[in-house]
Amino acid sequence: MVMTTMLPSSPCQNVAAEIGPRTAGAFYRNEAGTFEVLEVLRGDEARVAVNRRTDWAVVTRHLATGTESTHCMAWTDSDHLICCSTRSAVEVAAR
């Protein structure tokens, strides 16, 4: 039997895995609907936006209802990327 040791991943790797492929301008779907990612918040800005201890948050728009929300729910196997933004970061920020 070969023993292996799992090295802990870095906090940056954990955050990237939790956010997943969500970037400003991306579209994804899950059982709750289809969403456009308006912005990814980090640090203090994220903590203030969701009023809890977190390193990140995602601002989304539900395409069926137009409702915008901010959350820090991790990317899971039930989430599916539809497409990434073809717009530049400046164009996305100027929305």
Image (cartoon, rainbow, N blue to C red):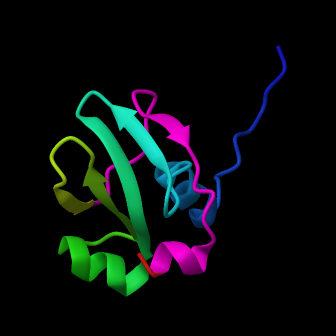
Q: In this view, does 36 lie to the left or right of 88?
A: left
Depth check, front residue: 17 or 66: 66
* Residue 50, percent from left and from top: 21, 70
Q: Which residue lies furthest to the bottom in this view?
A: 44
* Vertical relation: 15 (above or below) 42: above
Image quadrant in which the N terminus is located = top right
Q: Which residue is drawn at 39% across and 65% down?
A: 38
* Residue 53, percent from left and from top: 28, 72
| Snapshot quadrant of residue 6 | top right
Q: Which residue is drawn at 54% across and 76% down?
A: 91
Depth check, front residue: 29 or 52: 29
Q: Is residue 4 left or right of residue 62?
A: right
* Vertical relation: 32 (above or below) 91: above
Q: Is residue 17 located in the magenta-colored stretch of the structure? A: no
Q: Which residue lies furthest to the right in this view?
A: 2
Q: In this view, does 69 lie to the left or right of 23?
A: left
Depth check, front residue: 54 or 22: 22
Q: How many numbered tags mark residues here? A: 0
Q: Residue at x 71, y 48 (%)?
A: 7
Depth check, front residue: 34 or 14: 34
* Residue 88, percent from left and from top: 63, 71
* Vertical relation: 66 (above or below) 88: above
Q: Residue at x 21, y 60 (%)?
A: 69
Residue range corresponding to the magenta coloring: 71-93
Image quadrant in which the C terminus is located = bottom left
* Residue 39, percent from left and from top: 41, 69
Q: Is residue 78 located in the magenta-colored stretch of the structure? A: yes
